[in-house]
Amino acid sequence: MNKKVVVMGGGNGLSTLLRGLKQFPLDLTAIVSVCDDGKSTGILRKEFNTPALGDIRRVLISLSETEPLFEKMFNYRFETDSYLNGHAVGNLLLQAMTDMTGSVSDAIISLGKVLNLKGKVIPLTENGDITLEAEMTDGTVVEGEHHITEANKTIKKVYYKREPEITEDALKSIKEADLIILSVGSLYTSIIPNLIPKEIKEALQNSKAKIMYVCNIMTQPGETDKFKVSDHINKLNEYLGNRKVDIVIANKGTIDTDIIEKYATLEQKDPVILDKQNLKGIEIISDDLVKVEDGSLRHDTLKLALNIFSYLLK
């Protein structure tokens, strides 16, 4: 029987990790943060009072076994002067199916059959009014995920404006998991939003599964400036309550100086340093996980997934 692996996150980071993991014999479940409120997703949320669909769309495609052309269609965004401008086709399909079935969860199941998913996709909540807020170190409060990422201030803590109701499938998957992975991705706006609700904290507390964190290769402006691997873990542990991160996967590969300078200049990002001396009582899995595609840094998804699968074989 395949090991049950639950991956929690959102954004591009979660879908990137899942693309690698789906190549291995695993029982995969993705729990997706649904508090995004920008672009096409934000417009649909305001009009239909649904949780964010954009990250769900990305995850569905990452686990799909359909033709590449269908993936391109699902991610295609209209460029027009009309109200359709900027909308992703997949978001519209998800919204239509949500209206037809009555819930985002049922919409995912229905579309999942068409996409031939290699895993399950579960929204953290069905609440349409879920709103992420952040208190900054200067005392100001910023409301809305995309406003938080664009605030250019240092985050002190994030929380929900109103506690969301967690989907039963999310709680059930955590209870049954053999391994729980906190995905690579935006720390405060993609990963931590999954850890804030009390029901999730309780489920993690009662779970016998180890908690693994896949650390980012680069820092993120406004969220993790100057963060080392230990800083990421310490922040996650603050939100995990009585549970803590058990295992971390981090990059130990070198990055070309030209690429480092490019990221520092254009995106204000720096490499995340693996500071083993500050990682006491935690299992460290380190590897050269750097992959450069078209001048951009990426995780080597297959190598990353192989490290996770190898850990599960122990």
Image: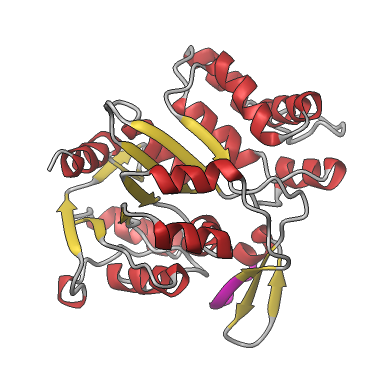
Q: Give x and y (percent) for residue 235.
A: 41, 73
Q: Is residue 126 above or below residue 240?
A: above
Indicate yes or no whether the magenta region holds residue 205.
Answer: no
Residue 190 is situated, as x and y percent measured from the top left of the image, at 52, 55
On the image, the x and y values in percent for residue 176 come to 39, 43
Most extreme residue toward the bottom, as rendered?
138
Residue 152 sits inside the magenta stretch = yes
Please name whichever residue, 129 or 145, is drawn nearer the observer in this view of the structure. Answer: 129
On the picture, is 19 further left or further right than 276? right
| Residue drawn at x 46%, y 59% as measured from the top left | 266
- Give the left or right position of residue 142, taking residue 280 as reference: right
Q: Which residue extends farthest front?
A: 206
The quarter of the picture where the C terminus appears is top left
Viewer can see residue 200: yes
Number of numbered callouts drawn: 0
Tell whether 72 sits left or right of 255. right
Q: Quick check: 167 above or below 225?
A: above
| Residue under the image location 25 percent in, 46 percent down | 290
Relative placement, left or right, of 40 versus 301 is right
> What range is drawn magenta here?
151-158
In this view, the residue farthest toward the left is 314
Residue 253 visible in the shown view: no
Rendered-image quadrant of the N terminus: top left
Up-down relation of residue 300 to residue 210 (above or below): above
Q: Position of residue 295 (x, y in %)?
A: 35, 42
User: Residue visible at 16% across and 39% down?
Assistant: 310
Q: Tell me how the rendering is colored.
A: secondary structure
Residue closest to the eye, 113 or 37: 113
* Residue in the image at 43% along x and 58% along y: 204
| Res 245 → quadrant | bottom left
